[in-house]
Amino acid sequence: MNPREDFLLKAFELGIIKFGNFTLKSGIESPFYVDLRPLASSPQLLKTLSNNLLELVDNKDFELICGVPYAALPMATAMSLTSNIPLIIKRKENKGYGTKRMVEGVFHEGQTCLLVEDVITSGKSLLETIDQVEREGLIVEDLVVVLDREQGGVDKLRERGYHVQTLFTINEVIDILHKYHRLTDSEKVKIKEFLNNPTEEVVQKRLPLEEKKVTHPIGKRLVELALKKQSNLIASADLITSAEVLRFANEVADHIVALKLHSDIIQDFSDDLIYQLKKLAKEKEFLLFEDRKFADIGNTQEMQFKKSIYKISDWADLVTVHPIGGAESLKVFENTGVITLAEMSSKGALTDDYYFSKVINVSENEPKVLGCVAQRKIGDHLLLFTPGVNINVSGDSKGQQYNTPEVVFNNYHTDFMIVGRGLYKSADVKTAAKEYQTLGWIAYLQSLN
Ligand code: S5P
């Protein structure tokens, strides 16, 4: 066994690669899952890895080493300690306060920087990282990467003139694990087949609404209505009197799949308003959506849901929840469909990557949740709802940020767009609703191709 094989087998024992059936963030099913973070749990392996990575570039001088959180951060730190080259850290996200820098550490413009990454797939995210480091005035020419998933990333970076060195390719990893009986013949065949398929194509594609793997009855109903009415429009009736809400509901009714309310801003809220809305919803076929954004312990949420003067449990088909109180707090919503907030549309929202992935995880595992509010792609098991849509303005003075229907359907693969002021502030609400309906549906159809 050569030292590379020895390293790989020990790393495998730590759990850096798992075999089975995994749904990736993109929604595709993969027979393996790679996570190099456990390497930091073995100082010996981390040291070996860091030496191997340094050897890949031992004929070059760099003024800085940059680690990308999280997996590459301990690797870059170990390389910095061995080589005496100072470390800088590329943030995952702008922290939204303080210095607002994407790269942390002591450095100045014009310095050369070696970038360290754990895994390269299509190269897209690595190019974004390089771009952010270069924007700080640093010179990036060389990159070292532990694992190449062989999905075109290395070529893409080389085309752009970057010098990329990788320690292992995924095919090599599979061959070594098979050679030392960590993988059976049939597992190897299955994985190689998966690797030979151009998965990038699959990643980019979105599922048509009817193929979304939604099991909640209200989720299914929403999909059914969307297909029937050829609409993915949810109108947000952020109005403060019952008369305005009713007038608005009547004007948009033919063009929407749901009417979203903030009951607690309606000054004369009454059972009669709900009676009228229910009647209209039944006749014109749309759902009633209370954007309550529950955010408490289960017991309190249950009382807010059932006992408040709004009697939400009596009429709402859909409610929004910030699942900050944990998965069990979601169990109180009975047959109403829960939509969790994974990410908010407003500037500086605290819903960062970490929070987002935790919400997705909770939502995928709680049957009461049928979808999430977010400004980016999520998997096929949840419906995606995206507010912050307006065709005329890019934001307001209170932090709201808008996108067009094209952006939310093509880039985020959203299923439903939520529009408030774009509709109710319009001089002709009915025409505006029709326009949003048409633009939304066309953008959705285009995003399927
Ligand atoms: O992140 C969010 C989540 C929601 S539910 N951003 C949002 O804007 N919303 C809601 O969508 C918001 O409370 C409002 O009711 C609607 C957007 O309204 P507009 O007037 O900005 O289109």
Image (tube, rainbow, N blue to C red):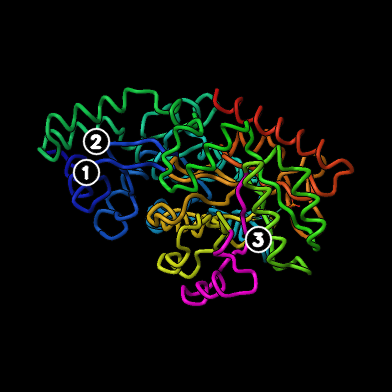
Marks 3 and 2, the one that precedes in the sequence:
3
Percent x, y of residue 38: 30, 55
Residue matched to label 2:
173
Q: Residue 8 has which mark?
A: 1
Q: Is residue 29 above or below residue 246?
A: above
Foreground of the two, 373 or 163: 373
Percent x, y of residue 87: 49, 56
Q: Amino acid at mark 3?
A: Gly
Residue at 48 percent across and 75 percent down: it is 297
Marks 1 and 3, the one that precedes in the sequence:
1
Report, in whole angstroms, how far the alpha carbon at label 1 lies from the one at label 3: 39 Å
Foreground of the two, 4 or 256: 256
* Residue 431 magenta: no
Residue matched to label 3:
96
Residue at 81 percent across and 51 percent down: it is 247
Report, in whole angstroms, how far the alpha carbon at label 2 lies from the one at label 1: 8 Å
Q: Is residue 365 above or below residue 333?
A: above
- Left or right of 111: which side holds 393? right
Percent x, y of residue 400: 74, 54
Q: Amino acid at mark 1?
A: Leu
Residue at 75 percent across and 57 percent down: it is 238
Residue at 39 percent across and 23 percent down: it is 198
Q: Residues within 10 Å of mark 3 (few under 14, many from 20)?
A: few
The quadrant where residue 242 appears? bottom right
Q: Which residues are magenta?
A: 286-315
Foreground of the two, 151 or 427: 427
- Left or right of 326: which side holds 222? right
> For the residue labelled by badge 3, is the local secondary structure a helix, a strand or a loop?
loop
